[in-house]
Amino acid sequence: MKPLIGLTPIVDAGRDSLWMLPGYMQGLEAVGGIGMMLPLTDDAAMLKDIVDRVDGLLLTGGNDVAPVLYGETKETFCGENDPRRDRMEARLIELALQADKPVFGICRGLQILNVVLGGTLYQDLKTQTSTEITHSMDKPYDRTVHEVNILPDTPLAALYGPSPLAVNSRHHQGIKGLAPALHAQAVASDGLVEAVYLPEYRFVQAVQWHPEHRWQAAESQSLLRSFVDACRGLK
């Protein structure tokens, strides 16, 4: 039986709607998983029921995590926040860790994972750092714009080897202070942490780039397959 993976919804407050990029579903399906968009809720009982039923969680991209969650005042260059989604994902992460259910975060998913575990974020990389890397690319999103260095003795090193990995990039925020429990496993040339993992769990990983936009690429499918295999109980 294919593993069922719950995807957190992307919120469009202006249209009062929830949506999902098809690449998330297509990428999971291509490597043997079934993706299902979850309802937007912060109801504790419902979230517990969700985690009990799914085989894994994928924390998707989307709007900015509220700075109050990492002890900062919101600056003008911070984007829109959705407190309900923040609460939902924070609780899902806690429940998934308690149950040792696989968790994979993409872009915002990496950021909320870092914040929930005690880390902080840059509210805007262009404003708060001197980076010259293209972190927020223009379309098309299925091309690569910079490289990340894979750190040794990490899950990504086991997957890709030691060579730099070319990635796409669609984010204006990023990790400022890495959460104490998280380990970095890929870093951009400007020092920004671009991938993390929790070593003591079956599979808790997150990346700052967007494999869903490049789901047909071999390196994206390798990463998604490692997640789906963990959801299937093969790792």
Image (cartoon, helix red, strand yellow):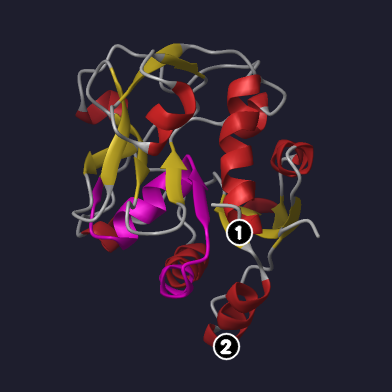
Residue 15 position, x and y percent, is 71, 53
Q: Residue furthest front?
A: 234
Q: Residue at x 65, y 21 (%)?
A: 218
Report whether 38 appears left or right of 226: right
Q: Which secondary structure lies at badge 2?
A: helix
In the foreground, 29 or 41: 29
In the foreground, 27 or 141: 27
Tell me if mark 1 has few (under 14), some (14-19) or many (20+) residues whose alpha carbon lies within 10 angstroms of its own. few
Q: Which mark is residue 45?
A: 2
Q: Which mark is residue 121?
A: none
Q: Residue at x 65, y 24 (%)?
A: 214
Tell me if mark 2 has few (under 14), some (14-19) or many (20+) residues whose alpha carbon lies within 10 angstroms of its own. few
Task: Name the kind of residue labelled 2 in the image.
Answer: Ala
Q: Are marks 2 and 1 in contact (CB under 8 Å)?
A: no
Tell me where the magenta segment starts and ends, as one range. Answer: 94-120
Q: Which secondary structure lies at badge 1?
A: loop
Residue 132 position, x and y percent, is 29, 11
Task: Name the kind of residue labelled 1 in the image.
Answer: Gly
Instruction: Compute the Cα span from label 2 to label 1.
Output: 25 Å
Question: Circle 1 is placed at which residue position?
Answer: 233
Name the quarter where the N terminus is drawn. bottom right
Report whether 63 appears left or right of 179: right
Nearest to the eye among marks 2 and 1: give it.
1
